[in-house]
Image (spheres, rainbow, N blue to C red):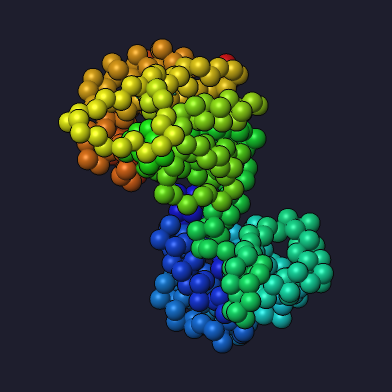
Amino acid sequence: MILEGKRIILGVTGSIAAYKAADLASKLTQAGAEVHVILTPAAQQFITPLTFHSITHQPVVTGWWQPENGGAIQHVALAETADAVVIAPATADAVAKLAHGLADDPLGGTVLATRAPVLIAPAMDAHMYENPATQANVRLLESRGVRFVGPEAGRLASGLTGLGRLSAAETILGALRQMLGRGGDYEGKTVVVSAGPTEEPIDPARHITNRSSGKMGFALAEAARDRGARVVLVTGPVALASLYGVAVVRIRTALELQAALAKAMAGSDILIMSAAPADFRPAAVSAQKIKKGPEDAMSLDLIKNPDILAGLSGDFIKVGFAAESQELVQNAGIKLRDKGLDLIVANDITAPDSGFGVDTNRVLLIDREGTVEALPLLTKAEVANRILDRLVRFSHR
Ligand code: PMT
């Protein structure tokens, strides 16, 4: 949501990775940004303006002298009204030109003319990137507040392997969102979020788990990062990609979750517990795979896991979730009180479009005063922001 309505200048330079900029332009446009692409002359050898125009529905800048785009003055106007400039991919040549303030093409001129934050995603041969000249240019730009994302290690166009691959579009988007979120209403706050299920082992092949996908917790972590927070995400086993700019701690069992949270909460301001830890675990874990015998039934002894949330206390705001299939308000209210929470997010997990696994959620926010706010069906990203809107009004205990 942070990209909604934002005016983003996407500079594309002459790298074989230029084709990946089309995907980035598409993702930015889908996220609601107004994307203005500037192609350097070298970039136009790899990809055409038509590609970007078709994706962004905006004029594409290819040179200083385009009367249909308003000529050189138009590029200065673009620079002045931009919310951010992203240069992806940025070649060694582009990084050098930007470091030394050259304006021999519209991209260089725009970066000089803008007050908007600049994010550079380099892509080049590994030796070119490691060269002291490139490294000095990177440091010079960083010292002026320009941010870099990547490059990443992997296979390069030359066939060699090394540090020089353009970061994935999702990673660049994450870095951009974090950059735009600087100075947001969570700046200076540390938010710890838990996400996903736990796995309680039975033997080397089997475990007890639940249907939590981690989507709600990841959406919370992403939203807090986008609003300027330092975020620690403690997650059980999930199939979601790591989030740029979020410190991720991976755990498997409820006991590991408990230990990781105890460590993460030192000095933190807010805990949002959206994980679904198992309430019980097998009393004994078999070192060998349990064999099927002649019996028609078997039983498993379970022992109680600690109530992690109830056991955590300190000078921080404590938020829990309640996954309920009946008596939503009443059951969530009991959990709010018993676990000493400031806010509980009550989830109806019986609706097919809410709770486990899906991208949407329908929740009630219940605070210590008993105020109940019913939110409509929203995406998990929207729910996350509504929770953060509510928490920002809370003061520390
Ligand atoms: O991950 P998704 O697929 O996106 O699904 C999201 C979700 C449904 C998992 C999430 O929105 C949610 O409701 N999380 C809480 C799940 C849960 O464990 O609810 P509970 O009512 O059993 O527990 C109440 C609170 O105590 C929760 O904050 C839980 O994290 C916490 N708890 C539970 C058990 C335990 N041993 N220790 C705990 O601290």
Quadrant of the displayed image that contains ligand 1? top left
Work out whether 378 lies above or below 295: below
The image quadrant where one finds the C terminus is top right
Residue sticking out furthest to the front: 294
Where is residue 338? Give x, y as percent.
Answer: 41, 12
Residue 14 placement, left or right of 93: left
Q: Residue 238's image quarter?
A: top left
Q: What residue appears at the point 67 percent right and 76 percent down from the top-left corner?
A: 125
Q: Is residue 276 left or right of residue 296?
A: right
Quarter holding residue 327: top left
Residue at screen point 47% across, 52% down: 241
| Front residue (pair 51, 35) | 51
Relative to 181, residue 91 above or below: below
Q: Nearer the viewer, residue 317 or 82?
A: 317
Q: Count up the numbered dots.
A: 0
The picture quadrant where one finds residue 116 is: bottom right
In this picture, residue 375 sits left or right of residue 163: left
Where is residue 137 drawn, in percent x and y? 78, 67
Residue found at the very far bottom of the displayed protein: 45
Q: Where's residue 108, x and y in %? A: 69, 74
